Image (cartoon, rainbow, N blue to C red):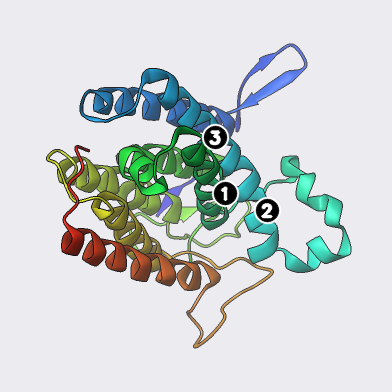
């Protein structure tokens, strides 16, 4: 059993402004992703200016889609009661699946502007996405939120706002699987030219798989709980379509064999 390290969620202050570790993790993920994608420009048909635009549109999609997705998937009654609550970002509440949809919508608009297909962009950026995901999960751990179920494993953690029993540090499980391992898989897979759709498909399959497994150790959202059989969660239901779509993309990509340089 481990005690949760007392980490101040505020990293530092700039006058009256409090800079939180969680926000810094997003910022670090943004710049780390930029660095990784800059190395991929040598083999991709994108310019540095287009990379900057892709990251800008992606950031908008993450923020808007993540918040709207959370309200739709996890806080629908609150949204009905107070539609303006969707703007109350300072109260917390972001959804990866909503952010993913937001990014896809934003990049669809941008891809039309530059005359490229959406999948050309997603194949290009997919290997960098796990960096942001992993750092975001570290931010969740620092905030002492989104903890796991109670457990007797030696590495169980007693979180300050989760009672006196040790729990799975599911945020760190997600950091390792959705961040570190997923990055390694995508980076190695994308080192040689692959059929178009393939890199995006691998991302969807493995993220969906890792998220589905981790949900078995993660405490479900209190306002929703389990949806079926005493273990099925909202996160698992949202991950299943990702795996199916990813497998279809892999099948379609290798069947068409339209090779991409990235």
* In front of the other: 45 or 95: 45
Q: Is residue 132 shown above or below 228?
A: above
**Secondary element at image label 3:** helix
Q: Is residue 155 visible?
A: yes
The residue lying furthest to the bottom in this view is: 229
Asked if marks 2 and 1 touch (Cβ < 8 Å), the reply is yes
User: Which callout, 2 or 1, points to the residue nearer the camera?
Assistant: 1
Q: Which residue is mark 2?
A: 68
Q: Which residue is mark 1?
A: 102
The residue lying furthest to the front in this view is: 115
Residue 238: percent from left, percent from top = 49, 68
Q: Is residue 122 shown above or below 210?
A: above
**Nearer-N-terminus badge (3/1):** 3
Measure the alpha-carbon separation of dots 2 and 1. 9 Å
Q: Quadrant of residue 24?
A: top right
Report whether 123 appears left or right of 137: left
* In front of the other: 65 or 211: 65
Q: Is residue 3 shown above or below 225?
A: above
Mark linked to residue 57: 3
Quadrant of the snapshot with the N terminus: bottom left
User: Which callout, 2 or 3, points to the residue nearer the camera?
Assistant: 3
């Amino acid at each position: 059993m481990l005690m949760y390290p007392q980490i101040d969620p505020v990293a530092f202050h700039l006058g009256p402004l409090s800079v939180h570790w969680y926000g810094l993790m997003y910022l670090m993920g943004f710049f780390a992703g930029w660095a990784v994608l800059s190395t991929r420009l040598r083999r991709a048909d994108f310019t540095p200016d287009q990379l900057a635009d892709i990251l800008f549109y992606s950031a908008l999609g993450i923020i808007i889609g993540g918040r709207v997705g959370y309200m739709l998937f996890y806080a629908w009654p609150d949204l009905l009661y107070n539609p303006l609550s969707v703007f109350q970002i300072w109260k917390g509440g972001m959804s990866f699946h909503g952010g993913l949809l937001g990014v896809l919508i934003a990049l669809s608009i941008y891809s039309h502007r530059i005359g490229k297909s959406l999948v050309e962009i997603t194949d290009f950026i997919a290997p960098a996405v796990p960096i942001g995901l992993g750092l975001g999960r570290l931010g969740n751990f620092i905030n002492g939120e989104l903890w796991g179920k109670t457990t007797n494993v030696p590495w169980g953690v007693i979180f300050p706002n989760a009672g006196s029993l040790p729990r799975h540090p599911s945020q760190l499980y997600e950091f390792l699987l959705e961040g570190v391992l997923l990055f390694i898989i995508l980076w190695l897979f994308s080192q040689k030219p692959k059929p178009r759709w393939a890199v995006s498909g691998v991302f969807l399959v493995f993220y969906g798989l890792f998220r589905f497994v981790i949900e078995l150790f993660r405490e479900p959202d209190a306002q929703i709980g389990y949806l079926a059989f005493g273990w099925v969660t909202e996160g698992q239901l949202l991950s299943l379509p990702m795996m199916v779509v990813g497998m279809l993309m892999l099948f379609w990509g290798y069947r068409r064999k339209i090779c991409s340089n990235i």
